[in-house]
Image (cartoon, rainbow, N blue to C red):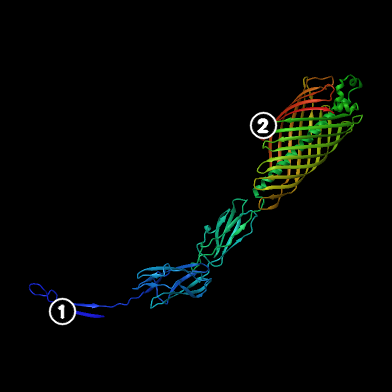
Amino acid sequence: MSEVRLDNFVGRAANQQATFREVQGVVVTLPVAPEIEISASESGGPVADGGSDPQGLEPSGVAKTVTYTVMNTGTNTLTLGGTPTVSNATNITGAVNVGLPGDLTLEPGETTTFDVTYTPAGDGAFGFDIDVANNDPDEGVYDIAVSGDANDAPGVTLVAEPSPPNGPFPITAIFNEPVSGMTLAGFNVVNGVASSFANPSAGVYTIIVTPTNPMLPVNVTVPSGVATDSDGAPNSASSTLTFVLVAALTPTDIVAIEEIIIEETVRDLRNRIAFNQRATRDARGRHAGYLRCRNLTEEDLSDADPSIEGLGGCAAVRGISIEPVFDGKLSVSKSLATGSGSFLTQKSSLDGTSRRLAFGELSVSRHEDDDVTSSVEGRVAWERLVGDDVLRGLFIGASARRSDIEDDFTGNRTGFGLNAGAYFVDQLSENLFWDGFVTLGVGRNNLDLGNGTLDVDGTYDTTSVQVGVAVTGQRDYDRFTVYPELSFAYGVASVGDANVTSVSTLATTTEVVSVGSVALGVIRFRPEFVFAGEGDRFGISRRQLSVAPSVLCETIRTDATDTECGGGLELKWSSRSVDGRGEFSARASREVVGGASRDTVSIRYERPF
């Protein structure tokens, strides 16, 4: 440092006075050198050479990046010695990554930065040293000690509690330490809806997940950072809990299949009862014809129209065998379409007291719910006169059925069965008969259904019994005859457990659908008015028009009992050929039971062959 003094300045003004008396100055000589200063983003201020940069509490296993700013506060160019180095790393996962500073040469007042990234390994203290080489004469290597405490992130495990195969699924999230901040939204659910969030104990949380699409799996996770421990460390993510939905039937599906089985069983019972009633009614007609013709004198028989031999009763007395006959009918209506046919062949003893018959019936029905049922019934019967006025019959039979089903499940039901039974016809008085039947049957049924999600196959067996009685009178008038009939029939079927196999794109399972027993009772009053178009002296006519109104009630019993009543009307025109061997008939009928109508139109032609 130097000092200069100047005094006694002499001015050049006219008055010879000096403007300044004295001037003094101080000159300071400064060194020329760079000066390095480093600041840390974590602390927000400068970190002295050899000082520390505390990191505080950091979560274990989570990478942390700190940015350091280098500034030249000196008077000459600062030159950095490349990428800073790290030493003395403790409790650090892997290597500490240090980035190259943006500039290695800094003029006075300039700055540059570099990043340091580290990952604490586990619970406890961690640390490392950063060395920054430079040309500062005082701080040729700038040392910074980085240190802190690592805190393990709370871990979480998902546990699936016992549940139905297709849910809902109770799920428990268990943290390895108490946490806060966990909510229902902390669960990430794919293909499901989470509900019923609860926190039964510290670190334990529960929800219930309901699947939304049975064709897809359900995935549940707890993402990282949705909860924190007491030190503020966010949780780590859980592993994914996956539920693969199996093809198990839901309770709604099981109810739908039960309803299909019950509906099909009721239809089988109704068809079997109707078939038995028709067969017994035909037997009554044969027996009445036999009794009528049995009482004719030889003179009456010799005077009769030859066509009398074509009638079952008289043909039996005369010792004539009836050739096989086939008839068919087809009916169509808005709510019900039915096609049916039957064949009959019989051979009688010469005295008419016994006969053997083989007959059958085929039908196709379209029901009001768009279901279509096809069936074939066959029977062989042996009839014998017991006493003077009682006809007894024994029979065995077989049946086959197919239903095309259009309900919640669509598809078909096929089945076959065997049956055996007996019937009788008794004349109470000249114009009054009563008859009855009993039938035992067994059946095997197969289901082939689907609802767009599941394909369902199953089998079930049935054991059934049907009984029926009827009382029929006869009243003759000039132009017509009335046959009032009061009948009652009851059928019950025991339905075995249905072993149902459900198949989806994900899995195959087997369920057992239990129905139990199904019963059907029918009571009907049916007066039939028969108008004879032509007749002879014995009341045997070749052309007839019949009108048969009816009232009926049906009772269906399963777990509950349902009774519906209604009525119906049937019109029939029939014409027999002159030789008595062929018959044409046309029929139209309508029934309304419980608000549901059944309409039938049919035609029939019968001729021996």
| Residue drawn at the location 15% of the way across and 79% of the way down | 7
Nearest the viewer among 520 and 604 is 604
Q: Element under label 1? A: strand
- Foreground tag (2 vs 1): 1
Amino acid on which disc 1 is placed:
Asp
Residue 310 picture location, percent across and down: 86, 25
Query: Which numbered marker is on residue 7?
Result: 1
Picture quadrant of residue 313: top right
x then y, percent, for residue 327: 79, 30
552 up-or-down from 447: above or below: above
Instruction: Identify the residue at the far bottom of this view.
Output: 2
For the residues labelled 2 and 1, the Cα–Cα distance comes to: 137 Å
Q: Please provide percent x and percent y for residue 444.
A: 77, 45
For marks 2 and 1, the one nearer the N-term is 1
Residue 236 location, quadrant: bottom right
Which residue is the site of mark 2?
Answer: 334
Residue 276 horizontal side relative to residue 138, left or right:
right
- Locate the C terminus by quadrant: top right
Per the rendering, the mark at residue 574 is none
Q: Is residue 559 visible?
A: no
User: Which image quadrant for residue 578?
Assistant: top right
Instruction: Count neighbours of disc 1 (C-alpha within 10 A) and say few if under 14, some if 14 to 19, many if 20 or more.
Output: few
* Left or right: 77, with 566 as reference point: left
Disc 2 marks a residue whose amino acid type is Lys
Q: Nearer the viewer, residue 122 or 27?
A: 27
Examine the rendered structure and indicate whether residue 256 appears above or below residue 237.
Answer: above
Q: Is residue 337 visible?
A: yes
Q: Which element type, helix, strand or loop, lies under badge 2?
A: loop
Q: Is residue 97 above or below residue 554?
A: below
Q: Locate the N terminus by quadrant.
A: bottom left
